[in-house]
Each structure stands twice: as structure tokens, then as C-alpha cells.
Image (cartoon, rainbow, N blue to C red):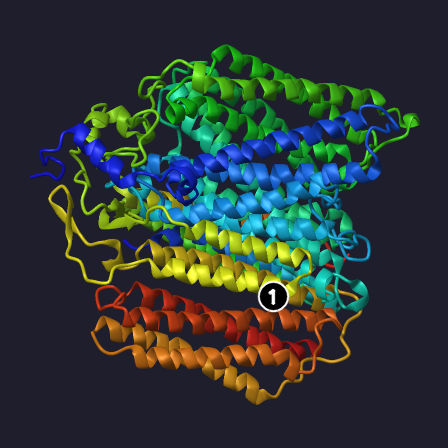
Amino acid sequence: MRTGVTGLGPLARHRALERIWRNPGGLGRLQVVNHSVVGRRFLITGMLFFFFGGVLAMLMRAQLATPESAFLSHAAYNQVFTMHGTVMMFLFAIPVIEGLSLYLLPKLLGARDLAFPRLSAFGYFCYLFGGGMLVVSLLMGAAPASGWFMYTPLSSRVYSPGMQADVWLLGITFVEISAVAVGVELCVTVLKLRTAGMSLARMPLFAWYMLVTGAMIVVGFPPLILGSMLLELERAFGWPFFDPGRGGDPLLWQHLFWLFGHPEVYIIFLPGAAIVSTILPVMARRPMVGYTAVVASVIATGFISFGLWVHHMFAVGIPQMAQAFFSAASMVVAVPTAVQFFAWLATLWMGRPVLRLPMLYLAGFLVVFVFGGLTGVMVALVPFDLQAHDTHFVVAHMHYVLVGGFVFPLLAAAYYWLPQMTGHRPSDRLGQWAFWLIFIGFNLTFFVMHFTGLAGMTRRVYTYPAELGLEGFNLLSSFGGFVMAMGFAAFAIDLLLHYRYGEPTRRNPWGAGTLEWAMLSPPPLYNFASLPRVESREPLWHRPELPGSMAGGRHWLGLPRNGWQETLGVDPMSGEPHSIVVLPGPSWWPIACALALAAFFVAFLFSAYVWAAAGALAALAVALRWGWDNGLRDDAPNFPAGDGVVLPRHDHAVAPPGWWGLAFALVADAALLASLLFGYFFLWTVAPAWPPERFLDAPSWLAIAVAGALLTGVLASRRARLGAGSGHATSGWLWLALVAAVIASAGFFATPVAGGVSPSSHGYAASVAALSGYAAVHAAMAALWCGFVLLRWRFRFVSALRSLDLQLLTLWWGYTGTTGLVILASLYLAPGAFAQ
Amino acid sequence: MSAARLLLAVSGLIVWSSGFVMLYAGLSIGCKAGVHQTGVLGANLLTALLFVVLIVHLAVLAGLQWHALTLWRRERGTGGYPAFLAALTCLVTAVGLAGMLAVGLPVLMVPPCD
């Protein structure tokens, strides 16, 4: 008998699932972790920030409309342009991408929620609080004013006294914690939480794009998090990473910033392209042409985009050959982008396209982004870049890429998916007005700006003299800007009114083939009453009866049981189910943890370091308590899942989502360490005022003791895991790993002191302290984790069948041991090697 | 088929990344250390070393491409995700190979430290 045919009618099943997935009301809404709700929160907050950033843009255009205008003072203008860039890049684009993915991915993949719903909720609160810090600072007239890229030395203490730069560094770091959390979420969800039969070859292209985007966030954001930490350490404690007089180098900031900054352009573009690749085939009424080639080009874009960062630094004085490497990579990356373009055109050419509202916005995207891509190839050429660098030409190029590559697809997505989200259709007429106002206004503003730049107008200046002859261009740009603003106002009105006045929509109004259209509009919190086995990339085109049979519970997990929020865990490659993932419900821990972190960041901002430490400890305590809730205290049998198959719960399976989550988090951690090591060797190679007066002179026995402790910890944690698997006592091994972690942590903390280097004396000493601190904190975490697992062992959360805690500990210890040895080698062997 | 197969699919670009980093880092450190001031076989030593780095990466990529083509010939026509992954591996490796060639060509065309 197939699971789901259990006597429950569709309505009774719906009610049973609604009871299980129900969200609390009132103040309890703060506990909600469901992906549809958290995704919508990201989207709404991101759109509010977008309109806020738009108002700032209008202030800038009002100021620049006429020469020598006194509309804004130079100080106010600096804050406004810094906040405009910051808001649009960090508080609008990335969070909206995250919100859309969090909302859509499970629905497209045939899952009932994300892999870590509480992590997403935590990410949302980090974003909200971090973004709130920045907005409050602007309202108080103390917003950052050094540009959204915060170049040193302008952002260093000497030239930016006060707390304006600190607001940026701390607020953005807080927001980036959110981004990395969501990046991990996206990767694990795509790889592990799909419906039955959805192999990698049958995944919707949207999921491929978001897998690559998630991985790029995980690798690309840590360099800026590290850069912000180092600059804050310099500003707060005088550790001179960027001070050329004391062995630092301002160019280190530029490297760290653009190591993040250029991939970020693609982190913004790829989700835009994901939207296009999802909507365009529906509008063309045929499957996407060149699926495999598109997947290959998305992966290629993800990798190659990490090899372009120096093209933002052509003017800083680097060797021609290095410039040629980055110039070549900047042109190579255009090829996979072009492959996607030709695939879209071929899909339209071979299909039977209909010009409905989302397609109109996609047409706008195709035109605008091509312009941005072409000027991108122009600025990839070093001689041209040297002419156009720091002019409004680059401002125009950047807006063509970002607005063309993301905003137009986002508007298409809004008109395409709003009926699914709210059950109501927006107005076609208002949508068309909005499109033409935005399209015309945008091109008036920014096409003209290419000429303004070529005529010599530099970026980031609050005014210009009349005799430069730039007033005509600037006035036109400002006029276009206000036309565009009217377009966005029309869109906002449509967005607000459609919920009340829009026509109710039927299921799947566009005739799409992907699973998000198999559900009711607006969708229930559990998404699907049962999860189907899919046999193609467009299951609804090949099996139009699926929505009915899914609602009837005739597929996988159609039987609600134990009050569990269940979805399928699958093999990442084949999509074959191998476990039943039981997802956590509403919880106070995500917001409590984010609040504790907010206390840390705010206290640090006001130099209240004791309170900051208290906030950090509180966040750690909450995180541990949060982790304590996970898992069962008893072994569970296998459960019927569907198609006559019985499956284990996820905590009884090998490599469950939690293991993958930690693995991706460690990739982010490794990217941070790699950036720190890059900084260490970069200063050594390039910075002036080297060598330092003294190198690390710690006794060699200290290094040997630390190395021994690291190896002991790695081996002991492995033995503990193997012991648990074979039913033997593991607590002795865990205690040994704990002691080893304490020794390693103490040894790393003592290294700079024992080695006679003072972090504020020189860039070298600061780097040594930062590397030692990194390793010490990781070893301390290993000690804490050993103690935590010992406790959970005692309280029966761990058994031979339920060894996830030990799998995670082993993974952490493996990372801590490996990176600890790399750091030891860098600290102790590099001085000798470089001296030779 | 394990997740390592997915890693193989992107290995062409991992090798490309390694080549890119080694060329850039090697150039920076080599210029700082004055390696370009030593001559070897009519070229400067730094250019020669970078050329070796380039050739080694191109050779590895060529080997990977051969392996990917073999996989693809074996799997094509079978349908399902193994055939898709084999085709994906071929395409991604080809991008890595072409990208390495494009990025590495300046080694032969431009003096290293000017």
C-alpha cells in the first residue's frame, strides 16, 4: 500500500498538517522560523531599504543637478553617497536575493522547508539589527562617510575620527554574519533537501544558480569580514595592519575589499540570471535550451569571478604582467555570461513567446545588461580603465550591470511570483507604466552618465564648477533619476494595492512546469501535502495531474505523524531519498542569539569592551542552549516514507544536513583564514617599513607542545567517534581531546607574549597576534565542544546509532588541528624562509 | 556515485584557480625577491619559472580533459544524472583549460616586473 492512502481526505490532511506547521501569533511571531515567513521578512525589509536607498539617490541627484549647488553640504553628501552604496549593496541586493531564495527554493525543490529554518531566522535578525545600526546612524547625522568601499587611510582613525567608520565596520560585519548563515543554508538545502528523484540533472536551473551563489557567499564574504575585523582592531587598539609607517599597507584593505567586492557583483547577477532562466522558458512556452551548458557557465562564472578583483586596482601601480592576468580573466568571464545570453535568445527563438508583464521586464533586462556587459569589457582593458577610472563612466557601467542584471529581473520576479505568494494578481496597466518609466528614466540617467564621465567628471565629489561644461549632462541625469523614481513609486503602489484590489488568481496562472505552482496560492506553511517523485525538469508539464495527487497525499510523507515537521533528505547526486529530516519548529533562540550579538556590536561601537565581552559570552551561551535542543534521547526505528520504502530519521543517517552545514561553515572559516594568511604574507612582501625590529622569538618547546596537543586532539576525537560507533566507552577519549584543546588554546594565546612581539608595534606583530588569536579561539571552541558532547553523552543524546554530535566534533577538531599546524608553520618557519 | 563526483566536475576550474593564484603570487614574490634579474636560457628566471607553472597546470588540465572525455564517451546515451555529470565535467574542464591559456599567455608577452 502506498503511503498517503490512509483514509485521510485532502481536507483532513490539510488540517492535520496545518496543526503541525502552525506558527504562533502575537509576540510569538518573533519565534517563527518557517521559510515562507522568514523569506517574506527578508524581502519586505530589503524592499524598504531599497526605497530608503532610492531616496538617498534622489538627494544626490538633486545636489548634482546644477553646478556648485548648496543643496547638501560636502559632509552631508559624503554620508549620503556612502549610505546609498552601502544600503543598496548590503541591505537591499544581497538580503532580497536571500529572501527570494529562502522563500522559493524549498517550493521549487519539492521540500517543505529549508535545512536549518532557525539559522535563517537568526540570519534575518542579524540583518535587521545590523542594518538598523546603519540607518539610525544616518538619522543621527553620524553615518559613515568614507564611501561604501571604506578605503584606508581615509577610513583609518587619523582621517576618520569619531565612530562613523566604526558604524560601517561593525554594522556591515553583523549583516554579513547573516549573509554567510544564509549562504550555508542555501547550499545544504539544495544538496540535501529535494523531492524524490530530483537528481542533479533534473534540478530546476534556479537551484543550480542558487547553489553556486550560496557557495560564492560562503567563500566571498569572509575576506571582507576579516578586513573589517582588522580595520576595527587598528581603529580600536592600534594594531597597524593598514598604517604604512608601522609595517602596514593601505593596499591590503583594497585587496581584502575587492576579494569580496568583485565576486559580489556576480553574487548579485547570478540570482538575477536565475530568475531569467526560470521565467523566460515559461514565457517562451518551451524548456530552456542548453541546460547543461548553462549549468557549466554558471559554475564557470562562480569560479572565474574570484580572479578579477585586481581590475578594480589597475591604477594603484602593479606590474604590467599582473594587470594582464586580471585583464584577461575579466574578459574570460564574459564568455560564460554570453553562453547564458545565447541560451536565453535561443529559447525565445525556438519557443512560442508571449509578451506578458514579466517578459516585458525580462526584455528590459536583456537590453540594459548587454550595455553593462559591453562597458565591462571596456574597463577590463587596462589603458581604457586608466582613463575612465574614478569617473562617472564607471558609475554608469556599475549601474547598468547591477540594475540591469538584478533590478529588472527582480521586478519580473515580483510580477511573476506575486500571484503565487499572495493569491492576487498585480495590475497589468500599472506594471507597464512602472516598466516604461523605470526603463526610460534609467537610461536617461545612466546612459548620459557615460559621457559625463568621459568628459572628466570624477566620482564621489559633491559638486563641480560651472566652467567644466558638465551641467547639461548632469541635469539630464537628474531628470532621468526622478522619472525612474516615479516608475518605482508606481511599482510600490501596485505592490501595496494588489493584495487588496488585485484579482484572485487561479493555480499556476502562467502554465509553468516547476513545483512551486503545484501548491495553493497563497501557499500553506507546509508547502506540499505529499512530495512527488519527479522524472523531469518540468514535472507539471509532463504530469499535469500532480497538484491533485499531491494534495491527496498519494506521494511521499503524505501521512502526518508524531507532530513532526517532516521533509525528505536525499542523496545529493541522485536525489534518491535516504532519510526523513525532522525540522525544528518555532523558537526564541534565534532572536535571543541575535540580540546578544547586537549587544556585543553596540558595546564595541561605544568602546565598552567589558560589555562587549559580556555580549559575546551571552551569544555563546544562547548558541549552546540552542544546540542542546537538537536531537533525540532514544534510538528511533525506521519509518514508512512512501513507495513502500522505510527510512531512518535524519539523526540516524550518515552525513545528515547538520554535518553538511558545519562543513560549509568551515569552508567560510577557511576562506577567512586564507585571507588572513594572504594579509600576513602580503605585508611581508609588499608593505613599506619592513622588516620589523624583531621577529617572533618564542621557545621552540612551546610550538612542539601546541603541535602535540593539536595532533592528540584530532586523534582522540576520532577515537571517541569510532568508539561510540562500536558501542565502546568514548568519554575517556573526549576528556583527552578536551585537555588537548585547553593546552593548544593556552599555547596559542601565549605565543605573541612568549615571542616578545607587541601587536601595536608593527604590522608583522599585529599579524602574528591575529593568527595566534584565530588558532587560540578555535582550540578554545574545541574544548568547549568536547565538554558539550560529554554532557550530551551523559544525557543520552549520543548513542551508537545517533553519533551526529561526535561527527561534528571530529570535523571541527580536524579543521582546528589542520589549520593550527598551518598557522604554527607560518609563525615559526616564515621568518627563516623569508630571511633567506 | 559519491559527492566526490561533483568535485571532479568542477576540478578543471579548481586547477585554473590554483594556476591563477600561483602565477599572481609567484610574480609578486619573484619581483620582490629580484628573481627576474637572473637570466636563464636567454630569458629571465622569473618568466621561466612562471612559464613552468603555466605548463604544469595546462598539462594537468589536458589530462583532466582527456579523462572527462573518456567519461563522457562512456556515459553518453545512458541518460540520467551520470551522463549529465560527464557532460558537465567536459564543459567545465574545457573552460578551465581555455581560461588557463588566456590568463597565462601574458607570461610570454609582457616583462614581469615593469
Give the quarter of the image for residue A774.
bottom right
Residue at image point 33% right, 80% down: A733
The answer to whether residue A723 is visible is: yes
Pick whichever, A438 or A398, lies toward us.
A438
Q: Farthest residue in the front direction?
A: A26
Position of B52 relative to A693 (above/below): above
The answer to whether residue B43 is visible is: no
Residue at image point 71% right, 34% down: A395
Residue carrying label 1: A677
Percent of width and height locating residue A161? 79, 54
Left or right of residue A200, residue A637 in this image: left
Percent of width and height locating residue A576? 23, 46
Badge 1 local density, few (<14 within 10 Å), some, or many (20+)?
Answer: some
Percent of width and height locating residue A670? 51, 61
Q: Secondary structure at mark 1?
A: helix
Q: Quadrant of the N terminus of chain A?
A: top left
Left or right of residue A23, residue A180 in this image: right
Q: Farthest residue in the right direction?
A: A467
Residue at image point 60% right, 81% down: A750
Left or right of residue A304, residue A113 in this image: left
Position of A679 relative to A398 (above/below): below
Q: Amino acid at mark 1?
A: Leu
Q: Quadrant of the C terminus of chain A?
A: bottom right
